[in-house]
Image (cartoon, rainbow, N blue to C red):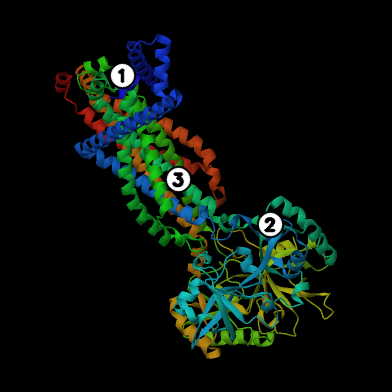
């Protein structure tokens, strides 16, 4: 039926012939009535009416008829092809099962990873025109930091590129409900904060500018998550009072669920209510600034608009050099920047696994099409064109791929749940990953693409031989030597892809092993840590704050089994922290002379509790009280930065505080040097750090750290078992001060490399899957080689070839494509592993040990995959082989 279109008239000719026939018949009728030919023709045309309209109508009817016929024919053939494909799959259960499992594994893994990438990176943020949201930060000497209140004020007054600009200080709050208290994350924000994001509350309202002033800020807006978790989604919560940090706050509204961006994002918002003194302060940089660009404003335009603002800041505060500038970054980009590249690496890796799976199925289809050579030749002999045969074979591939896609979706459902459960904490929107409509569309599209990828080459290959050649072949298959190169080529491609996966996994494994060798600078064994915060309303006096923290140390020290207790404003293996610019005695103040260092307020036994070694000098003790000589302890890195090549003990350093005149910085004496601690994580470089005794803490420092400290307790037994007793000890001092963020130091240390370990685990798993699939492909090609050349092997053995000679012949058949694949994979990995460079610690991306290990592993897998068919070939009976030929 399909070939009838080759000789069928087109619609225009058919209509012209039909109209001419009818005109001729009418003309003859008029001629029979006695009219002359011209009059008869004219009378016939008048009877037809508007001939052009009739012709156009007939053409439209003809085209619709042909379109309907082609549609019916196409769908009829498609139904036949699908039914035939299902019969073929059912008739070959072994082939079907292997192909389905191979494809389902690749499609399922790719879909699961894509669902995570889509949720975290690709899904638009749930804000009004989120592409116009930006972060504003401060940069000095290539170091990025938050913005001071004074900077924010000038920026808000002078800028012309933002429709809305807001500032936020992320914090935590003691939330008291009845007799229970808990610590919850939140933020102090300007009244414009919610306008920037363009999100309206689900209940009630947000606070306005009149409430964002000192003395008027006792109001709060709740997140949807906190509203459900602590208030049972009570719709009457609006206008009720709750206690935050010991003070009543009126609930104004509840934000919608889509405003909860991450599982650990802030759960409430209160007005920041800047004081006049804060708005002229330029030294303390603690504000996160977000803005919404006006229509048509680009990021380069923002940079130009910042220049006069920066000039004004330099004029007001001459201490700032002209090197200070503002930076502006896409909100979406910074929101996921840490995870974007890592997730796309995983998506690329699982894509390689899918390609390997497609290569395996393509090899299976090549072998199957060879066995069906006589069938396809008979189809061609009966009139089926090459295009019709290719369409039939591609339909079979599509049916196989769609079935595998359905099975892959089941794997993806399980895979997404596993990824969310095992994923590291802090990944934005990871918990929102699911198999939704977008992921379903991706899986369907992926299945159809796979059907073309693995089905096109076998389908085109199947129609190459001539009909007579295939019919003469007698049904033994028409693969022919002309197509023998396709299977080894596919194996080379699979091996090359497996090399890429294994090299990436090997480098991450080597990096993980190097991380295990890195010493954190302290002893984490037997130490439990937790945070606690003193309410501002009850602890405004700095002296009372310091005394309360010292009492907490005394109470905790009385717990049985406790060896040492220390408090610190910043525990190792935790993000963030406060820093200060220091400069040594004998040098004038200038921004270029400053050494930026991380600040820690600590109690005297902190170093013992954490097991941080003293390198020289002494630790803090009872002498270091308020009113005594001001002292500090520095780490080795800061000592070298301040006094290179000199002994830092007894030397003075200016920092943090000023004398009574407010201008002259107070000098502090270095009394000790402690070992370097990798405070930000095992994979991070050591940062300059200094420590001040809690008793001598600058009064403003309690505002910097929001009266929040970490308690670290060392014990010989199980450190986690001390937590209840520690909570009771603190409750005896103040029952409204809860412990939160409780974990052992070993858990904190493990948490800093959780993302790296997760990526390593996944990439290693994908590498192993790729290796297994490649080995299966090698086995299939070698087994097919043995089957196709059984007669030749029998002849060789009849002529004197030994089983060892046959084994060598078979192994050479596998060695060539594997060697080519390994070489191609190593060349490709030299470029591809650049994306892993930032994730590697202590190992180069061209690490010889890793590359050699990958080659050995692949060679071993190829050898094992070839042994079984090689031994089968060596056991061929020459007589039987010759008779079969």
Say which residue label 3 marks: 349
Q: Is residue 177 left or right of residue 871?
A: right
Residue 510 seen in this snapshot? no
State the residue at coordinates (46%, 75%): 228
Q: Position of residue 284 (x, y in %)?
A: 72, 70
* 3 or 2: tag closer to the N-terminus: 2
Q: Nearer the viewer, mark 3 or mark 2?
A: 2
Q: Marks 1/3: CA distance?
A: 37 Å
Nearer to us of marks 1 and 2 is: 2
Residue 333 makes an appearance in the image? yes
Quarter the N terminus occupies: top left
- Residue 370 percent across, percent down from the top left: 27, 26
Q: Are marks 1 and 2 in contact (CB under 8 Å)?
A: no
Q: Marks 1 and 2, Cα distance to the nearest angstrom?
A: 65 Å
Residue denoted by label 2: 294
* In this view, the mark in front (1 or 3): 1
The image position of residue 308, as x and y in percent, is 81, 58
Position of the C terminus, as image quadrant, is top left
511 is higher (above) or lower (below) than 188:
above
What residue is disc 1 on? 465
Q: Secondary structure at mark 3?
A: helix
């Amino acid at each position: 039926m399909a070939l009838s279109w080759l000789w069928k008239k087109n619609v225009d000719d058919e209509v012209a012939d039909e109209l001419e026939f009818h005109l001729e018949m009418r003309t003859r009728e008029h001629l029979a009535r006695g009219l002359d030919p011209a009059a008869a023709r004219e009378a016939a045309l008048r009877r037809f009416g508007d001939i052009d309209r009739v012709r156009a109508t007939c053409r439209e009817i003809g085209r619709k008829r042909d379109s309907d016929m082609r549609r019916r024919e196409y769908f009829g053939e498609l139904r036949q092809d699908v039914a035939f494909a299902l019969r073929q799959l059912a008739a070959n259960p072994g082939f079907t099962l292997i192909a389905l499992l191979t494809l389902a594994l690749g499609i399922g893994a790719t879909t699961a990873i894509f669902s995570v990438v889509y949720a975290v990176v690709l899904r638009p943020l749930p804000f009004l025109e989120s592409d116009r949201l930006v972060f504003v930060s401060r940069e000095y000497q290539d170091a990025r930091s938050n913005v001071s209140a004074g900077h924010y004020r000038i920026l808000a007054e002078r800028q012309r590129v933002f429709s809305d600009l807001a500032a936020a200080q992320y914090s935590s709050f003691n939330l008291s409900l009845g007799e229970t208290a808990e610590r919850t994350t939140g933020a102090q924000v300007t009244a414009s904060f919610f306008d920037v994001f363009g999100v309206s509350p689900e209940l009630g309202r947000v606070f306005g500018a009149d409430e964002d002033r000192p003395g008027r800020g006792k109001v709060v807006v709740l997140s949807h998550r906190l509203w459900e978790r602590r208030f049972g989604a009570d719709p009457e919560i609006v206008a009720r009072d709750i206690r935050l940090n010991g003070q009543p706050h009126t609930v104004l509204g509840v934000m919608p669920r889509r405003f909860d961006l991450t599982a650990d994002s802030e759960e409430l918002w209160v007005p920041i209510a800047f004081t006049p003194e804060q708005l002229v302060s330029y030294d303390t940089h603690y504000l996160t600034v977000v803005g919404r660009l006006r229509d048509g404003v680009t990021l380069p335009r923002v940079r130009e608009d910042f220049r006069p603002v920066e000039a004004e800041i330099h004029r007001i505060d001459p201490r700032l050099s002209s090197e200070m500038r503002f930076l502006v970054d896409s909100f979406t980009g910074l929101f996921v920047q840490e995870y974007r590249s890592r997730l796309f690496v995983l998506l690329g890796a699982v894509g390689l696994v899918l390609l390997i799976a497609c290569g395996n199925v393509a090899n299976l289809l090549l072998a199957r099409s060879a066995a069906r050579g006589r069938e396809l030749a008979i189809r061609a002999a009966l009139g089926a064109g090459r295009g019709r045969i290719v369409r039939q074979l591609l339909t079979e591939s599509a049916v196989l791929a769609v079935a595998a896609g359905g099975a892959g979706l089941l794997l993806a459902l399980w895979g997404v749940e596993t990824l969310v459960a095992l994923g590291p904490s802090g990944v934005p929107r990871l918990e929102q990953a699911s198999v939704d409509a977008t992921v379903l569309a991706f899986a369907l599209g992926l299945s159809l693409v796979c059907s073309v990828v693995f089905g096109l080459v076998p389908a085109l290959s199947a129609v190459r031989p001539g009909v007579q050649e295939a019919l003469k072949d007698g049904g033994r298959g028409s693969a022919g030597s002309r197509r023998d190169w396709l299977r080894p080529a596919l194996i080379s491609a699979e091996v090359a892809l497996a090399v890429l996966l294994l090299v990436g996994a090997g480098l991450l494994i080597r990096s993980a092993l190097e991380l295990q060798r890195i010493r954190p600078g302290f002893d984490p064994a037997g130490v439990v840590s937790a945070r606690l915060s003193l309410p501002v309303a009850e602890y405004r006096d700095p002296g009372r704050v310091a005394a309360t923290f010292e009492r907490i140390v005394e109470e905790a020290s009385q717990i049985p089994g406790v060896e040492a207790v220390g408090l610190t404003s910043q525990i190792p293996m935790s993000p963030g922290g406060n820093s200060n610019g220091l400069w040594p005695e004998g040098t004038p103040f200038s921004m270029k002379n400053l050494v930026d260092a991380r600040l820690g307020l600590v109690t005297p036994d902190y170093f013992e509790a954490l097991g941080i070694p003293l390198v020289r000098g002494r630790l803090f003790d009872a002498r270091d009280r308020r009113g005594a000589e001001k002292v500090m302890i520095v780490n080795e890195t800061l000592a070298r930065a301040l006094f290179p090549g000199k002994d830092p003990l007894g030397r003075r350093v200016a920092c943090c505080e000023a004398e009574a005149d407010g201008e002259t910085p107070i000098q502090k004496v270095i009394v000790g040097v402690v070992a370097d601690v990798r405070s930000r994580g095992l994979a991070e470089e050591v940062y300059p750090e200094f420590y001040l005794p809690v008793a001598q803490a600058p009064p403003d420092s309690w505002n910097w750290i929001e009266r929040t400290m970490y308690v670290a307790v060392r014990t010989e037994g199980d450190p986690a078992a001390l937590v209840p007793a520690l909570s009771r000890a603190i409750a005896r001092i103040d029952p409204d001060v809860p412990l939160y963020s409780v974990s052992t130091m070993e858990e904190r240390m493990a948490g800093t490399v959780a993302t790296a370990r997760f990526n390593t685990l996944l990439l290693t798993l994908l590498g192993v899957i790729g290796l297994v699939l490649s080995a299966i492909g090698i086995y299939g090609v070698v087994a097919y080689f043995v089957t196709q050349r059984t007669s030749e092997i029998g002849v060789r053995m009849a002529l004197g070839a030994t089983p060892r000679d046959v084994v060598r012949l078979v192994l050479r058949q596998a060695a060539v494509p594997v060697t080519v694949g390994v070489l191609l994979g190593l060349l490709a990995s030299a470029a591809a592993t650049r994306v892993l460079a930032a994730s590697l610690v202590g190992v180069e991306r061209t690490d010889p040990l890793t590359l050699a290990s990958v080659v050995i592993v692949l060679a071993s897998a190829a050898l094992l995959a070839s042994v079984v068919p090689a031994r089968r070939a060596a056991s061929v009976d020459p007589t039987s082989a010759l008779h079969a030929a």
